[in-house]
Image: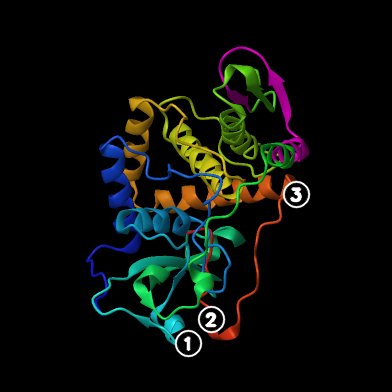
């Protein structure tokens, strides 16, 4: 059995892969989902991965052609009575341990500045790389509910989010000053799913208001802050798409967006970790407000993994 070896740090490896895709004109978080086969990457115990691991394991699964959403460590596969096939290469997943320093540095003048984070990594394998796993690790596509039933569920979800939404004009936008989402009328979209996917993107911006998650929302187009916020909304809406079965590939971000994202990511290899953490927070807030029941079963001790932070 071989493990992927790299002299880069996990953050540098992930950032380099994303930069390569963006330079090719592809957004790596846009997946060819359908309502019947949507899933976040899942741990061996069935709980979803969070933060940057969502995007990273999506990319790894797509590149290798893996059809199972489940990922696990070598030890976990053995505990399940299974075996990673000889010659299979693992994928690095990451987590962050947070602790408070016992002694403050000279420049630490606030309690919060003594918080330290240590980035760690561990190797996981997709269920498709493992022989002898129970059939539940290779789930069949979920059945598609009748259109009227699905529409009703999605309508209730978005109606439960207490955002001020105005339907006007031909462009979608969020105004932090007015704390208001502006959307074109649903009839101007290709179909209702594309309307909902666009709304999910704008609602992801809405979560950043100072009275909610308090992200930096004052950046002008072309600034680093603007690029970071757009990336947060992009990843958040992709995560929502995975949970709700909504398309995300139609969102039209031209070359200037890609250029601004590349500038941010090339300047700081850890920026994507921060973006993914904030996107996780945004998506999680909307899912709670929309009263979605997201599967979060507890892990058995034998399958427990190192605690994974959504921030790095």
Instruction: Name the residue that disc number 3 marks.
Output: 291
Q: Which residues are magenta?
A: 154-175
Examine the image and state in which quarter residue 160 appears.
top right
Q: Nearer the viewer, residue 180 or 104?
A: 180
Q: Earlier in the sequence, mark 3 or mark 1?
A: 1
Label 1 or label 2, whichever comes before in sequence order: 1
Give the answer, above or below, for where 266 lies relative to 65. above
Q: Is residue 222 visible?
A: yes
Q: SS at mark 2?
A: helix
Return the mark for residue 79: 1
Residue density around tag 3, few if under 14, some if 14–19, many if 20 or more, within 10 Å: some
Classify residue 86 as left or right of residue 38: left
What's the CA distance linking mark 1 and mark 2? Answer: 8 Å
Residue identified by numbered label 2: 303
Q: Judge by depth and name the residue closer to the eye, 87 or 239.
A: 87
Q: What numbered label is drawn on residue 128?
A: none
Asked which secondary structure carries label 1, the reply is helix
Answer yes or no: do the residues labelled 1 and 2 have beta carbons within 8 Å? yes
């Amino acid at each position: 059995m071989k493990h992927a070896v790299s002299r880069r740090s996990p953050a540098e490896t992930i950032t380099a892969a994303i930069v390569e895709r963006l330079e090719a004109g592809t957004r790596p978080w846009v997946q060819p989902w359908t309502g019947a086969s949507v899933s976040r990457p899942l741990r061996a115990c069935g709980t979803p991965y969070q933060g940057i691991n969502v995007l990273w394991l999506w990319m790894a699964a797509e590149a290798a052609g893996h059809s199972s959403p489940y990922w696990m460590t070598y030890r976990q596969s053995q505990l399940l009575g299974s075996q990673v096939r000889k010659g299979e290469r693992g994928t690095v997943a990451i987590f962050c341990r947070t602790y408070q320093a016992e002694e403050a540095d000279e420049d630490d003048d606030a309690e919060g500045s003594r918080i330290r984070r240590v980035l760690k990594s561990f190797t996981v394998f997709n269920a498709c790389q493992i022989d002898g796993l129970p059939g539940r690790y290779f789930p069949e596509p979920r059945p598609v509910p009748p259109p009227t039933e699905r529409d009703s569920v999605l309508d209730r979800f978005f109606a439960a989010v207490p955002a001020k939404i105005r339907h006007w004009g031909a462009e979608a936008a969020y105004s932090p000053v007015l704390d208001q989402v502006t959307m074109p009328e649903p009839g101007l979209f290709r179909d209702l799913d594309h309307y909902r996917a666009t709304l999910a993107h704008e609602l992801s911006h809405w979560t950043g208001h100072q009275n909610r998650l308090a992200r930096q929302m004052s950046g002008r187009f072309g600034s680093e802050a603007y690029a970071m916020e757009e990336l947060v909304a992009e990843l958040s809406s992709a995560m929502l798409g995975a949970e709700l079965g909504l398309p995300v590939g139609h969102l039209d971000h031209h070359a200037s967006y890609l250029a601004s994202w590349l500038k941010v990511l090339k300047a700081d290899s850890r920026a994507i970790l921060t973006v993914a953490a904030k996107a996780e927070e945004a998506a999680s807030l909307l899912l709670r407000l929309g009263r979605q029941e997201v599967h979060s079963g507890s892990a058995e001790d034998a399958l427990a993994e190192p605690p994974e932070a959504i921030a790095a």
